[in-house]
Structure formats: C-alpha cells, structure tokens
C-alpha cells in the first residue's frame, strides 16, 4: 500500500473512520477489531491480474474517478496504465520530482497518453495530478 497512492488513501480513510467512531463511542472495541480484520482481509484480497504493482498503481489512479471507469473499459485503462509506466520510466532520472522542467515534460506526456486513448477531457486534470503523485511515490520508494 505504500507505493499505491489511491489504495493507501482508501484504506487510511477506512482506518481513520473506525478509530473516530471508537473515540466517539459509537462502536465498542470488539466492533473495531472486526473492522480491522475486515480491512486486513480486503488488503490481502487485492485483485490478482497480470498487472505489475506499478501498473496496478497507475490503473487505480486512472480508475479513481467513477465516471471515467464507467466511460472507459477496464482493458483501455489497463493499456493506458501500461503505457504510462513505460513513458514515465523513460523520462525519469535521479530526483526528477524536484525538477520542474522534468515534471512539466511528464505532465505533457501524461496528457498526450490520456488524450490518445480517449480519457474523458473533463477528468484529465485530476487524473494528471493523481498520476504525478503516484509517480513521485513510486520514485521515492525506490
């Protein structure tokens, strides 16, 4: 989960919600433990497909928006995720996330790939931000 921004946010929100409800005394310790067990099971039950962890992270970033997931097929999102991984690997270097000119080139490449595969234009700006955050997270983890 450390390298997948979207999944990290989802599971963190669930965990914080369970703890908040416990502190508000709306649930007891047993119910919180049951929710934590369910959360752990959900973490283990991540979809097993032929995507690499990096491709899965970018797929999740692309599919974060429900309307994009509805408008595009899973296969299109998988192809975009694969192409994003290849493009970003080719344009990164040491500490690339600190260099604005490299970040600008990456934003351009991301927008070009999204446009090429027909990603909804009204959702592109949020997708570009999420994909860049995802790329930074992956780069920092290496």
Image: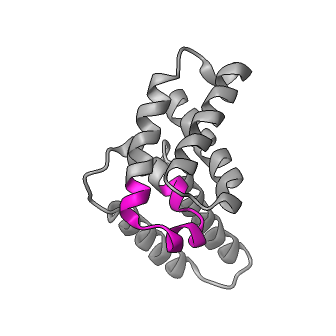
Query: Tag count in the figure?
Result: 0
Quarter assignment of residue 83: top left
User: In x, y percent, where is residue 7?
Assistant: 51, 57
- 80 on left or right of 20: left
Identify the magenta region.
Answer: 60-78
Decide whether residue 136 is among the magenta residues: no
Picture layout, residue 75 above or below residue 112: below
> Taking 115 as reference, is 132 above or below it?
above
> Which quarter of the figure is the C terminus placed in?
top left
Asked whether the viewer can see residue 2, the reply is yes
- The residue under the point 44% across, 49% down is 80
Is 60 situated left or right of 9 in this image? left
The colour scheme of the drawn protein is one colour
Q: Is residue 7 visible in this depiction of the protein?
A: no
Vertical position of residue 54 compared to residue 123: above or below? above
Residue sitting at x 51%, y 62%:
63
Nearer to the camera, 51 or 139: 51
User: Residue 9 in the image: x percent, y percent?
Assistant: 60, 57
Which residue is outermost to the top? 94
Q: Main secondary structure of the magenta part?
A: helix
Q: Position of residue 36 (x, y in %)?
A: 47, 69
Q: Is residue 71 magenta?
A: yes
The residue positioned 48% from the left and 56% from the top of the image is 60
The furthest residue to the bottom = 26
| Of 101 and 133, the residue lying toward us | 101
- The spot of residue 114 in percent (x, y) is 55, 49
Residue drawn at x 45%, y 54% as measured from the top left: 59
Judging depth in this view, the residue of 114 and 20 nearest the camera is 114
């Amino acid at each position: 989960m450390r390298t997948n921004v979207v999944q990290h946010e989802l599971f963190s929100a669930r965990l914080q919600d369970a703890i908040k409800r416990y502190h508000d005394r709306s649930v007891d310790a047993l119910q919180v433990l049951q929710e934590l067990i369910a959360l752990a099971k959900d973490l283990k039950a991540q979809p097993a497909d032929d995507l690499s962890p990096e491709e899965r992270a970018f797929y999740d970033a692309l599919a974060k928006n429900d309307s994009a997931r509805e408008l595009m097929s899973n296969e299109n999102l998988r192809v975009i995720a694969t192409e994003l991984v290849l493009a970003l690997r080719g344009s990164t270097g040491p500490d690339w996330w600190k260099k604005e000119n490299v970040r600008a080139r990456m934003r351009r490449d991301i927008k070009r790939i999204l446009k090429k595969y027909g990603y909804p234009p009204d959702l592109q700006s949020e997708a570009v931000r999420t994909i860049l955050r995802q790329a930074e997270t992956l780069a920092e983890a290496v």
